[in-house]
Amino acid sequence: MNNLFGIAHDEGYQVLSHNYSYSEYELSNNQGGQKHPLASKSFVPTRSQLGEHLYWQQPVHRDMSQGSYDDTIKFRAGALKEAAGELDAIHLGGINISELARAGLADMLRRTMTDEDKITLYERYKAGEISEEATRLLLGEEFDLLQEDIEEFAAAAEDDTSQYLV
Amino acid sequence: MATDEPQYPILVDTDALIAVGNSSLWDRITENIGLTTTNVCQQELKRHHEQNRSHAPEGSRSYRLHHGSTRVLDALEDKGTPLTRVVSVPRPHGADAGEQSLEQHLVQHPKAVDYVVLMDAHGRRSIRREIQNRDLEARVVPPTFLFYILYDNDLISRTAFCETCAELLKSEGWTGYHAVDAAWEGIPVDCSDVIDSDLLPPS
């Protein structure tokens, strides 16, 4: 366990040095509100058939509302529940309802956004109030297009523009 | 090329010309910067001019298309203004004909073009890919670059630059924000003391 700890400790600091931030909220969430003594170093105790281990946990930007993969959304499904269940039963190999729901919701969120929503979202991203992951999820390809344009403009701002004057 | 007009190394498409034509810096731009477009874009400008009413409500999209295209077409007709056009052979057709005509001109005359100015972000990416694939050196930028040239050469103040960006923010929605943010972050320049806070959403 000490060896495991030592290796994981080093890895943890390497990652932390790359500007990741650690969130106690994420850990306490996983442990039913009881913080582990090593929580501040991003380790979670787990048990397996080989005994007790400490695992280094991927740090997350909790302060920017970035959710973990295990976060859930509940909604009233109505006939959707029966429909999804039926299709799962009759479709060859079944269907991945969670995956379809994630993809469908992401698509509808993008379609729901107005120009003003996009501007507000990106301003909040720039102010550090929304994670890059959530911003990318909502803006899709447009996020990358904007980064490309910023880079191109930055390169153009190095050019001598006086030669284009008449 | 069936033209005896000078060709300038900055190529501009229809929508970028209209956006800049509607700005309060249009006269400064046409007095100071050499720009070239294509006969295909000129045709698109004529169509916008004819299909949109001059008495459309001020500030509406129709108003901007009509008045912006009118100002650009007038400048194209005026031989004393450094806004010229080249003729595209073969002539591209379809919804993206204007953008395609710029790309075609760039590919045919790679050494004559330094910048391609486009309003549409997807169009900019498409031409950038073509430039990469063909190992060319031109840059593809949003129309705010033309405001920047004036600012960079002390022909306008930072305040005027920022205020003109704000006009684009008001009129062009996310597309305008995209063009303005690329400039502000790319240069970079801080316009927060000039821009009316209600133009940007509350953070």
Image (cartoon, coloured by chain):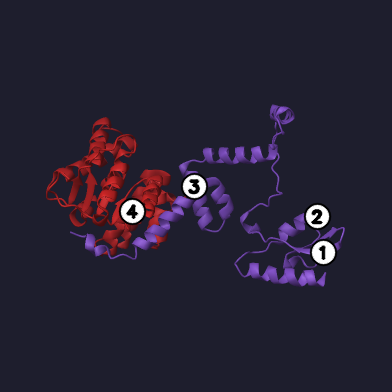
Chain bearing tag 1 is A
Callout 2, which amino acid? Gly
Among the chains pictured, the one given purple colouring is A
Q: Are marks 1 and 2 on the same chain?
A: yes
Gap between marks 4 and 1 measured at Cα: 56 Å
Task: Name the residue beneath numbered marker 4.
Answer: B144
Find numbered disc 1 in the image and state the secondary structure of the residue it sits on. Answer: strand
Cβ atoms under marks 2 and 4 closer than 8 Å: no
Task: Name the residue beneath numbered marker 1.
Answer: A53
Gap between marks 1 and 2 measured at Cα: 18 Å
Gap between marks 3 and 1 measured at Cα: 41 Å
Among the chains pictured, the one given red colouring is B
Label at residue A141: 3
Q: Which residue does the image show at 49% across and 47% down from the upper left?
A: A141
Task: Name the residue beneath numbered marker 2.
Answer: A32
Callout 3, which amino acid? Glu
Dividing the picture into quarters, in which one does residue B46 lie? top left
Cβ atoms under marks 4 and 1 closer than 8 Å: no
Q: Earlier in the sequence, mark 3 or mark 2?
A: 2
Chain bearing tag 3 is A
Q: Which residue is more in the foreground, B171 or A9?
A: A9
Query: Mark 3, residues whose alpha carbon is within 10 Å: few (<14), some, or many (≥20)?
Result: few
Q: Nearer the viewer, mark 1 or mark 2?
A: 1
Q: Are marks 4 and 3 on the same chain?
A: no
Cβ atoms under marks 3 and 1 closer than 8 Å: no
Find numbered disc 2 in the image and state the secondary structure of the residue it sits on. Answer: loop
Residue B117, position as x, y percentages in the image: 31, 51
Q: Quadrant of the N terminus of chain B?
A: top left
In-image side of B100 versus A45 (left or right): left
Callout 1, which amino acid? His
